Amino acid sequence: MNQLIEIINHFDTLGYFVFGINLLLLVFSSQILKQIYHDPDKVPNFSRKVMIFRALNLLMIIVYGYLRFFKNTHNNSQSDGLVFKLLAVIAIVYFAYLAMHLAHAFLVRQYGKERDVNGKTRFTSTYQTRLLSIFSSIVIGIVALISIIRLLGFDSILEAGGVIGLFGVFLALTASIWAPDIFHGLIILNSDMFSEGDVIQFNDGEDIYGLVYKTKVFHTVILNIANNHRVMIRNSKLRGFTVHNLSKFASARGLRESLSFKIGYDVSESQVKQLFETVYEIAKEDNGISIEEQYDLEYGIKDTGDHAVEWLFFYYTKDVEKLLLTRQRLLQLMLKTAIEQGISLSTPFTHTPL
């Protein structure tokens, strides 16, 4: 207890400030990071970020304690200097990383676009916020790099320039890996073809229906609607696909969808019309089928093949997140009603006798 009181008595104004600030950050680290990130529940390794934040605050206290007390009462050694420099470099990198996130969060809240994603209001990145974030990250990174160089003892311009030159060579050699994704990510944000919260369709070996969750510097995160899991796609690869934005309608009626059925020539047009009308009326009363019920039924012929007529059943929907579910429910209803009315939806096989 006496030693603790003695240590406290040796504190100066700077000591109280350093210990007080870091203790507050240590205690309220979780609340602080929740304010930085839009949706902490969906941030990967959020608990790990909190632990790292707390560990670095504790490290600051230990480093200051070492400098203030241990270093003044013990002989300096070369190993002590190396340990201190290593801890200081880690601290600079950490605070630079934290400053980049704080700057990005501020810019998104200040200049971002407010959108409703999965029932929650979020501020999403725009072309302007992305450019400002990249610029601020570059400035913070340069300041951190110069601080590290000075800390490691490269005082002369020649030495510092050599270190920065090596770093520049490294960036130049790896530019082909990361630069295209940044470039294409900025194009995606600038074109406004799709943004966070939009439902898109593209083909990557199979048709994928996904909700755009986040467009980041190097990649875009998409929530696969069919399988309910996240997909990470490089921005450069995503721009190589033909992407259909299902959330941006060309008409106030909503998205115009169609179902295709091949029905034999023995079924008359009036029977097909009755089938479609029955299904359409039942679908209007089904809360699980998201269609714009105020519009009249639309149907038509797509093709007259050798064995059957291909009919199209049209409907409008604005709830594109439930597009696959609506399609499945309509197909089930169509099959059930067709069986009840004695109409076969299987493609018949016909042949002409010789």
Image (spheres, rainbow, N blue to C red):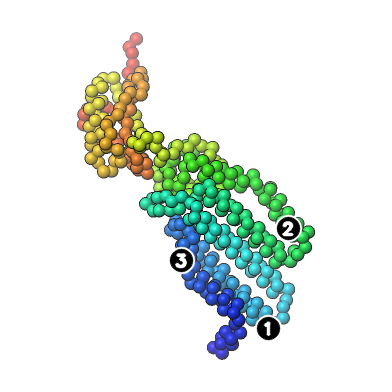
For residue 7, which numbered disc appears in the image?
Answer: none
Q: Which residue is mark 3?
A: 31
Residue 55, placed above or below residue 240: below
Residue 169, placed above or below residue 160: above
Disc 1 crowd, CA 10 A, few/some/many (<14, 14-19, 20+): few
Q: Specify whether residue 155 is in view.
A: yes
Viewer-side residue, 110 vs 89: 110
**Which residue corresponds to the image point at 54% horizontal and 88% vertical from the top-left?**
1
Viewer-side residue, 354 vs 320: 320
Disc 2 crowd, CA 10 A, few/some/many (<14, 14-19, 20+): some
Q: Which residue is mark 1?
A: 73
**Which residue corresponds to the image point at 50% horizontal and 65% vertical from the top-left?**
50
Left or right, 331 with respect to 99, comes to left
Amino acid beneath label 1: Thr
Viewer-side residue, 305 vs 106: 106
Q: CA distance from mark 1 to mark 3?
A: 38 Å
Q: Position of residue 242 (x, y in %)?
A: 49, 35
Q: Which residue is mark 2?
A: 163
Report helix, strand or loop for mark 2: helix
Circle 1/circle 3 CB separation < 8 Å: no
Return the disc, 1 or 3, that comes first in the chain's sequence.
3
Q: Specify whether residue 346 is in view.
A: no
Disc 3 crowd, CA 10 A, few/some/many (<14, 14-19, 20+): few
Image quadrant where residue 15 sits? bottom right
Q: CA distance from mark 2 to mark 3?
A: 38 Å
